[in-house]
Amino acid sequence: MLEDLQRLNRTHAVPGALSFEEGFGGVVARLGSAGSEAVVALQGGQVLSYVPAGSTTGVLWLSPAAKLGTGKAVRGGIPVCWPWFGPHAEPGKPAHGFVRAAPWTVTGAAASQEQTQLTLAFDATAVASELWPYQAQLMLTVAVGRSLKVTLTTANAGSCAIPLTEALHSYFAIGDIAEIGVSGLEARPYIDQLDAGRQKRQAGGIHFSSEVDRIYFDTTDTVTIDDPSLKRTIGVAKAGSRSTVIWNPWIEKGERLGDLGPEGYRRMVCVETCNAGPDIVTLAPGERHSLVQEIFVNNRA
Ligand code: BG6
């Protein structure tokens, strides 16, 4: 690992803005820009933390059991789910695709007055055809500044069309799940994953008093988390995304997951920027598609 770190720092570090270090048992990049900071794991291209300038509390929730290099995706931060969202119809294929626990390659780093940016790549042309019979190149950029902007770009490098579902599966840190409200999805249709996939329509804002697992589809709007106990709102804006998943496992499922920590379900909510459910992206040969999520925070006095 030491050799990797030395090589990465020699090739891509930006003095005062971006460096590579050991963290969570793996290699992470630390990005800083005018008081804002983010940590990104090379495993999965997963953002693990984002603390905006002026905040003492991180915006992303991360499991207290977070450990890289176990072959499993870390729970928390922003896992990248690609090229399918959720479980695969064929047995033996991993839920949420195969890039969230795989190693990504650093291809670029840059810093300006406004932001610091890291670019990673994943070569999906090298994946076994039994797992995924298509040819694609993936690029992920993470830009830290007054906001955190994550862009996942898929380029079809093969000769047939690729059907794609995907997610930037963000876990947000909150004061108490029973107190927050999520807005921006009013009157939108959704698939209730806890009610045999029935289609329903959202009435008003979203509040939590039990497990929630919903794919809101046909929506491009910004979603806002209002958190009275942490006295802040978190905005999740997006582009290239037609679905938003809202998930909280609540008590029983939270215990089954085993990596949330005590009462962990209370301190997290997932607002995921996706193309999922009926929102399938079809990429023609040579075509590119970008899924973009931008997170910004407003602290109340
Ligand atoms: C959410 C899904 O996106 O991810 C849930 O809507 C799922 O159904 C959750 O349980 C977590 O998935 P995993 O594979 O990370 O445990």
Image (cartoon, rainbow, N blue to C red):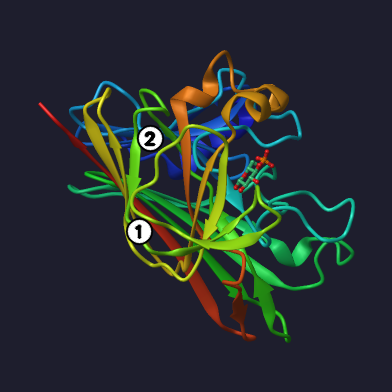
Question: What is the crowding at mark 2: few (fewer than 14 residues within 10 Å), some, or many (at least 20)?
Answer: many
Please give the residue where the numbered disc 2 appears in the rendered image: 38
Image coords of residue 87 (percent x, y): 75, 53
In what element is the residue under mark 2? strand
Q: In this picture, is 34 found above or below 187?
A: above
Q: x and y percent of residue 232 in the render?
A: 23, 32
Q: Residue at x 69, y 84 (%)?
A: 161
Q: Which mark is residue 186?
A: 1
Q: Amino acid at mark 1?
A: Glu
| Front residue of 56 and 139 | 56
How far apart are the two marked residues, 2 and 1, measured between alpha carbons? Answer: 31 Å
Whether residues under marks 2 and 1 lie with C-beta atoms below 8 angstroms apart, the answer is no
Where does residue 38 sit, x and y in percent of width and height?
A: 38, 35
Q: Secondary structure at mark 1?
A: loop
295 or 106, nearer to the observer: 295
| In the displayed structure image, the side of residue 171 where residue 32 appears, left or right | left
Q: Quadrant of the N terminus?
A: top right
Task: Tell me where residue 228 sits by quadrant.
Answer: top left
Can you tell which quarter of the image residue 239 is in?
bottom left
